[in-house]
Image (cartoon, helix red, strand yellow):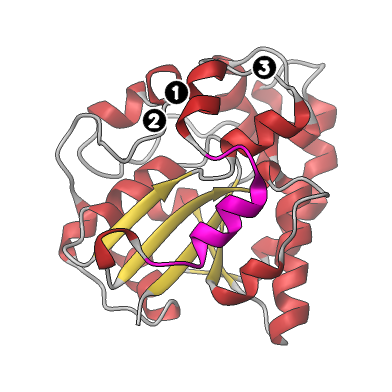
Amino acid sequence: MTVRIAMWSGPRNCSTAMMRAFENRDDCDVSDEPFYAAFLAETGIVHPMNDAVLASQPNDWRDVAAAMTGEAPNGAPIWYQKQMCHHMLPDFGLDWMDSVTNAFLIRPPEQVLASYIVKRGDVTLEDIGVVRQCELFDRVAERTGAAPVVIEGPSVQRDPRESLTILCEALAIPFSDRMLNWPPGRRASDGAWAPAWYDAVEKSTGFAAPSHVATIDDLPEAIKPIAEAARPYYERMAQHRIG
């Protein structure tokens, strides 16, 4: 039986590094943001490398949902699905989530925004996905009768071994030392958008604590209200974090 892990994150939250950690295991295969093309096709929003993304994945969410609950790539015992919360539009069905193990990767919104605006100057509350993440969190909690697994990105960066050990225990899979380091470079599993977004992670060989932890005072005045609006949703999930 394959353990299907849907790790729900917003952008700029070491989500690709977390995918690297799982992919470096001997028993795991990964999928990188499988709903991205469906999100772009449905919204008409134009992102960097838009045409390449649309051509690289199914454009219908139903096809993606069916794939996420189907046979794992290469028959892997563990299938790590890096999922972006903002890609799950209101019209996209969520019943497929009942067939996977859902976990949530969170980060303080001011830190997300400080990183996001380096890549894209324009940002909205919807772009960072925290509201949708909280909605998905609530759905899983309601369906299962318990809060799902929540892990905080900065905690993993500060102490990868301890945080990943606790995470694996919560996901009912064994911890592997191979999750702590990985070779630099691009992966065949990386999304078509990697050249626009993955420059830092391609140089990485493991998790590293940031040299500066952003606060709301580091944000431009126009961005601060977004961080303030996002914080209650972040805090609701953060009270359940592990590690």
Q: Which mark is residue 197?
A: 1
Which mark sits nearer the N-terminus, 1 or 3?
A: 3
Q: Is disc 3 surrounded by few (<14), some (14 to 19) or many (20+) residues within 10 Å?
A: few
Height in image: 209 above or below 186? below
Give the magenta range.
58-71
Q: Is disc 1 surrounded by few (<14), some (14 to 19) or many (20+) residues within 10 Å?
A: some
Q: Nearer the viewer, residue 139 or 181?
A: 139
Question: Residue 204, percent across and down?
Answer: 25, 33
Q: Which mark is residue 46?
A: 3
* Element class at badge 2: loop
Which mark sits nearer the N-terminus, 2 or 1?
A: 1
Image marks 2 and 1: residues in contact by CB distance under 8 Å:
no
For the residues marked 1 and 3, what is the alpha-carbon distance in whole angstroms?
Answer: 15 Å
When asked about the image quadrant of residue 209, the answer is top left
Q: Label 2 belongs to which residue?
A: 211
Residue at the spot 69% in from the left edge and 63% down from the top edge: 237
Is any atom of residue 232 visible in this view?
A: yes
* Residue 28 left/right relative to 190: left
Q: Which mark is residue 24?
A: none
Between circles 2 and 3, the one closer to the viewer is: 3
Q: Nearer the viewer, residue 235 or 58?
A: 58
